[in-house]
Image (tube, rainbow, N blue to C red):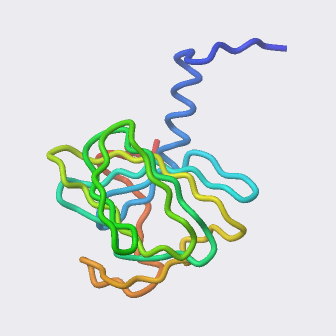
Amino acid sequence: MEERVVGEKGEFALFSKELKRNCVERFWGRFVSIESGKGYHVKRLTLDVGKRISLQKHLHRSEHWVVVGGIARVVLDDDEIVLRSGQSTYVSVGVIHRLENMGRIPLEVIEVQVGEYLGEDDVERFDDDFDRVDFGEEEFCAGEGCGEED
C-alpha cells in the first residue's frame, strides 16, 4: 500500500483541481463545496468587495459561519454584528440573516450547513440586491477565483 504525505505537491494539486470543479459563481462572488455528507455540507464563500447575499432564511438547515479573511457585517433577525478573521456566528433554522462584505478585500467565510435537507432551494428571500426571487440563478465558475477547467 502506498503511503501518502499530507501536503505532498501532487496530492495538493489533485485536491485543488477538485475544488475548482465544485466552484459555483454567484452575483455576490462564489462558493466552493469542500465536503458534504449525511446531514452536513461545508463551503468556502467568497464575497466580492461591497457585495452581500440576500436577506433570507432557511426552513431546513442551520449554518455556522467562520470568517477566515476580511470583515463581515452579519444580520441575524433584528441584530447586526461585525465579524473579523477568526470570529464566527451561528444562524439557527428560521432566522432571517444576511452576510455582507464591508471590507476592502474579498470576504472569505467557511460555512458549515447542518440539517435534514441541504438543497440550494431551501431559501426564502426577503430582500435581494440582484432581484432574484427563487432558486436557479447560478453558473459554474470558469473565471478568476475559481480557476479554469483543464
Left or right placement of residue 23 versus residue 52 in this view: right
Q: From the viewer's side, name the closer residue of 6 and 148.
A: 6
Q: Residue at x 43, y 75 (%)?
A: 96
Q: Quadrant of the N terminus?
A: top right
Q: Residue furthest left?
A: 104
Q: Position of residue 40 (x, y in %)?
A: 67, 55
Q: Quadrant of residue 86?
A: top left
Number of residue marks: 0
Q: Position of residue 55 (x, y in %)?
A: 35, 76
Q: Quadrant of residue 41?
A: bottom right
Quick check: 85 above or below 141? above
Q: Residue furthest right?
A: 1
Q: Residue at x 40, y 82 (%)?
A: 125
Q: From the viewer's side, name the closer residue of 42 and 81.
A: 81
Quick check: 51 above or below 147? below
Q: Quadrant of residue 34?
A: top right
Q: Position of residue 6 (x, y in %)?
A: 61, 17
Q: Residue furthest front?
A: 79
Q: Residue at x 34, y 51 (%)?
A: 46
Q: From the viewer's side, name the closer residue of 32 and 55.
A: 55
Left or right placement of residue 55 versus residue 62 in this view: left
Quick check: 110 above or below 130? above
Q: Residue at x 66, y 51 (%)?
A: 36
